Amino acid sequence: MAQPQTQRDIAQTDVKEPSTVSSHSHSVELKHHEEFWFHDGNIVLITGDTGYRVYQGLLSSQSTVFQDMFSSSIARHDELYEGFPIVRLSDSPQDLAHFLRVLLPKSQRHLYRLQDGSPFSFDQIFAITRLAHKYGVEDLQKQALYILQEYHFTNDFDRFDDPSRFAVDHVVQVRNIQAIGVVNLARLTDTPTMLPIALYRCCGLGGKLLDGWRREDGEVEHLSTDDIKRCLDAREKLAQEAFTLIDHVFSLSRAEKCRSHYSCILKRYTILRRAVRSKSVGSWAVLDSWKDFIQTEVEKSKVSEEDPGLCPACAKELVKRDLEERRTLWNRLPDIFGIVVQGWATQDG
């Protein structure tokens, strides 16, 4: 790696005023990034018309890709800004800023934030993951992917089905439209365990799936043609599975410890009819729990002290079946989407 150039005094410059970059052939106006323009920095990164004056050694020590780029730029001496080498990048200014906030933090020194820390946005996580992969910062890529896997795109059904995972303030929020970006990240980083749930959530987009997800920097992420086809085919399969699930969960077969079989059969038939008429029938969202619906219907079945409603054994049986049927569907998600995910559902035993 080339040695950093000797530091020199640089006049304080208003970060909003453009300066000029000189080369052997042309000059362009350059805006200083208000957050990443260090007056003792020794290399200038440029994206678009925005410049970032940073520390060559710090970035090179974390990324061999940066190290090679910087060495090449310094060796050529084809573009300089106030005597310092320039490296032009194709990343958007927003994405590069998100990335540098982690590599060159001024306060927060970890990607995975504490309970009292403000949450990352999905745009931040997406940019950090993509650029960490591009510039070969593997530990940062792993941290960013962990955040997505821990709270949203897990391969553990029990984790997925536990609503308490969203009870902490620092959890990154991911909208269904942003699942398009997650699919592309999974493909980019070869993280197939994220694909089943990411593709599953894309099934809820309808026609918006073809519009893509517009990133913070204005670029639009689209699924590949193959992944779009997977979602369209799977959406129909999931809707069919929803009917099967209802039939199995609300089956009129007797619970093992039911004490009032005839009465419970009538009440469960009523619950089955209401389930069939619910908006969840034929929906792609087959992994949504019926537990709240079941509990509400059990309460409705309580007519009087003489008719206490569905017996506890039958009520418990419905909740148990709901969990079992959804777990079975979860295990089959890779097959439904026509993908191979090695080790899927192994945590379920």
Image (cartoon, grey):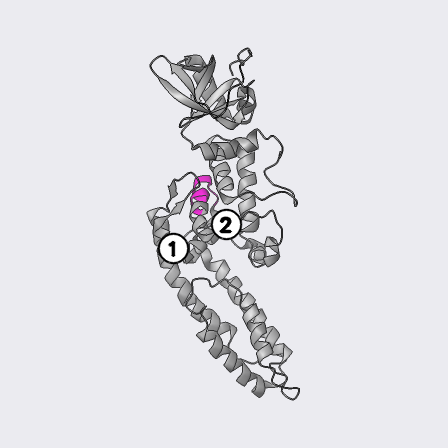
Task: Answer above or below: position of 186 versus 110.
Answer: below
Please state the horizontal and vertical placement of residue 283, each as a whole percent of the image: 42, 65
The magenta span reads 183-191
Tag 1 secondary structure: helix
Residue picked out by circle 1? 231
In the image, taking residue 40 as reference, residue 47 lies left or right, namely left
In the image, taking residue 113 as reference, residue 56 lies left or right, namely left
In the image, taking residue 17 as reference, residue 303 lies left or right, namely right
Q: Nearer the viewer, residue 10 or 111?
A: 10
Please state the horizontal and vertical placement of residue 247, each as a whole percent of the image: 47, 74
Residue picked out by circle 2? 174
Residue drawn at the location 53% of the way across and 65% of the way down = 289
Task: Answer above or below: position of 120 versus 159.
Answer: above
Question: Between tags 1 and 2, which lies in front?
Answer: 2
Residue drawn at the location 46% of the way across and 72% of the way down = 278
What secondary structure predominates along the stretch shown in magenta? helix
Of the residues shown, which amino acid type is indicated by label 2? Val
Q: Check the picture and name the quadrant holding the C terminus.
A: bottom right
Q: Nearer the viewer, residue 110 or 107?
A: 107
The number of numbered discs placed on residues in the rendered structure image is 2
Q: Nearer the viewer, residue 8 or 182?
A: 8
Measure the alpha-carbon separation of dots 1 and 2.
Answer: 18 Å
